[in-house]
Amino acid sequence: MFKKIFNYCKVSYEELVHKTTWPTRSELMNSAMLVLIASLCIAVVVFVIDFVFQHAMEFVYSLLR
């Protein structure tokens, strides 16, 4: 059983060290900026939708009074 675990760890390490292609710093920065911009865009869209619904509901409630 311990031999299987040791072999699994060894194979995993070999794959991470020799077979995995890691991104360059430039690629990583570009990806991070893309995620940041997309997150900000989604946050703005959610804010606008929330703002519109809030005012729409306030208008509907004011008609019901």
Image (tube, rainbow, N blue to C red):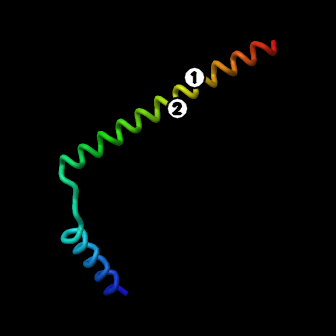
Query: Measured along the vertical axis of the image, is residue 7 above or below residue 42?
Result: below
For the C terminus, which image quadrant? top right
Indicate the position of residue 38 as horizontal and vertical percent values. Answer: 39, 38
Q: Residue at x 81, y 15 (%)?
A: 64
Direction right: furthest residue: 65
Foreground: 52 or 8?
A: 52
Q: Quadrant of residue 35?
A: top left
Indicate the position of residue 18 as horizontal and vertical percent values. Answer: 19, 71
Q: Residue at x 28, y 74 (%)?
A: 12
Query: Measured along the vertical axis of the image, is residue 1 above or below residue 21?
Result: below
Query: In 3D space, how far apart are the residues under numbered discs 1 and 2 (Cα atoms)?
Result: 8 Å
Determine crowd level at label 1: few under 14, some 14-19, many 20+ residues with C-alpha closer than 10 A: few
Indicate the position of residue 47 as horizontal and vertical percent values. Answer: 52, 27
The residue carrying mark 2 is 46
The residue carrying mark 1 is 51
For the N terminus, which image quadrant? bottom left
Determine crowd level at label 2: few under 14, some 14-19, many 20+ residues with C-alpha closer than 10 A: few
Which element carries disc 2, helix, strand or loop? Answer: helix
Q: Give the amino acid type for the residue marked by disc 2 in the picture.
A: Val
Q: Quadrant of residue 40?
A: top left
Q: Give the amino acid type for the residue marked by disc 1 in the picture.
A: Phe
Query: Measured along the vertical axis of the image, is residue 35 above or below residue 11?
Result: above
Q: Residue at x 31, y 87 (%)?
A: 3
Q: Residue at x 25, y 43 (%)?
A: 30
Q: Earlier in the sequence, mark 1 or mark 2?
A: 2
Relative to 26, 59 lies left or right: right
Indicate the position of residue 36 as horizontal and vertical percent values. Answer: 35, 38
